[in-house]
Amino acid sequence: MKLAMLDPGHFHAALMQKKMYPAIDPLVRVYAPGGPELDDYLRRVEAYNARSQDPTQWRMRSYAGDDFVDRFVADKSADLVVIAGNNRRKSEYITRAVEAGVHTLADKPMAIDVAAFRTLEAAFALARKNGVLLYDIMTERHEITTILQREFARLPSVFGELDSGTQDDPAVTKESVHCFSKRVSGVQLVRPAWFFDVAQQGEGLVDITTHLVDLVQWACFPAVQLDYRKDVRVLRAKRSATLLSADQFGQVTGLAEFPAFLRKDVGPDGKLAAYANGRIDYTLRGVHARVSVRWDFEAPPGAGDAHYSLMRGTRASLVIRQGAAEGFTPTLYLEPNAITSRGAWDAAVEAALPLVQARFPDIDVRPSRNGFEVVVPARYHVGHEAHFGQVADDFLRYVAAGALPAWEVPNMLAKYYTTTQALAVAMG
């Protein structure tokens, strides 16, 4: 298959090329506006080609110009396109790609507001008509503790049934903490200035929450086709800003001052208000869920992006923690409810463990303060960057099969309806 990259302004685009794929031609055509973002993307790919261990062999052919989207369509040079960049035009890029009959793998978010959601809904219909697949890059489904949380939730003897919860005490909670300053592939990440503009990147409510809402659906209702019109109800949502000084902004962008398009978000104190934080309370098929995201400037020493996840069942709760006590490594705990008979539950865990081990050899449990800690061998912790290649492998299998799993498209629509509707609620 011939691969194209369309406006690869986000570092996620390069991470898709951190490995080679037998089904993909090494010659990649790139269509983008010229400038530092294109240059940074090409440097990252070249670094993968030049590394001493397992180097890649990509050959890059770039077209840079204002008409790059039209040129991409006219060239008819791609079977598959990856879109990972500025989100303001992403729904347009997606529509043009599926209209041209190109399989499309898009970074999240595919829609940043209600209008873009409607465009996306039409794009899925167009993709179906043209016989191409449209899919988003949900890397977190490949994180091992998230996978194991889902696996243990499917064991009634351990988890029971999923509780329904309440608005103030949801049965499912997912929290994510991210950092503006971070290292990617061993190099300090330089973020484009537009990343801090909600009109271009999207608010926190429609960005990182995409992953969280996806995991709620994927873990709570595996392989179930959801209908956003009747299965999703957004109850409340709120947004807030992380304040960045000019020095902090300069540290992560390399710019000496805020560009003109961001000055609307700079307060009297000279700090940029980046509306990257938010929380959504909603129900999914009657189950109360809460997702929240927070952006800090940088993580404490030894830490990085952090994740917390709770699924509460009628017998036990499944909790992922990633704090100092866990060495900042995601760790899954199995914690029985107060009304659960501890002796019988402990025996149920031991009896059910071989079912998990059949799929994930050497997974084990050990006693913890409130139940069991799931012990995961180091080989399963492949790291966030490797998950991009795993998503690409999945997508290539779907392309070869000629279809996505039947639940994927309706559930993508349910996901983006949830996030964009939450933004509309938060904005009043």
Image: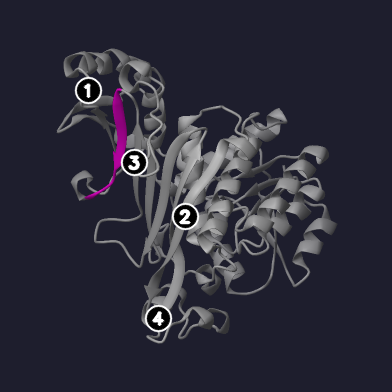
The amino acid marked with disc number 3 is: Asp
Task: Tell me the residue at 66%/62% (across/down).
Answer: 7
Residue 395 appears in the rendering? no
Q: Position of residue 159 (x, y in %)?
A: 33, 23
Q: Quadrant of residue 200?
A: bottom right
Residue under pointer 2: 237
* Towards the viewer: 59 or 406: 406
Q: Residues within 10 Å of mark 4 (few under 14, many from 20)?
A: some
In whole angstroms, how far apart are the C-alphas of marks 4 and 3?
35 Å
Q: Residue furthest left?
A: 369
User: Which quarter of the picture shows residue 337?
Assistant: top left
Q: Give whichever of discs 2 and 1 has the lower sequence position.
A: 2
Type of secondary structure dominating the magenta stretch: strand
Which sits earlier in the primary sequence, circle 3 or circle 1? 3
Q: Which residues are magenta?
A: 315-323
Relative image position of residue 131 (x, y in whole percent): 79, 37
Residue with the mark numbered 3: 169
- Compute the Cα span from label 3 to label 1: 18 Å
Side (left or right) of 118 relative to 389: right
Residue ID for mark 1: 339
Residue receiving disc 4 = 271
* Front-most of residues 41 and 334: 334
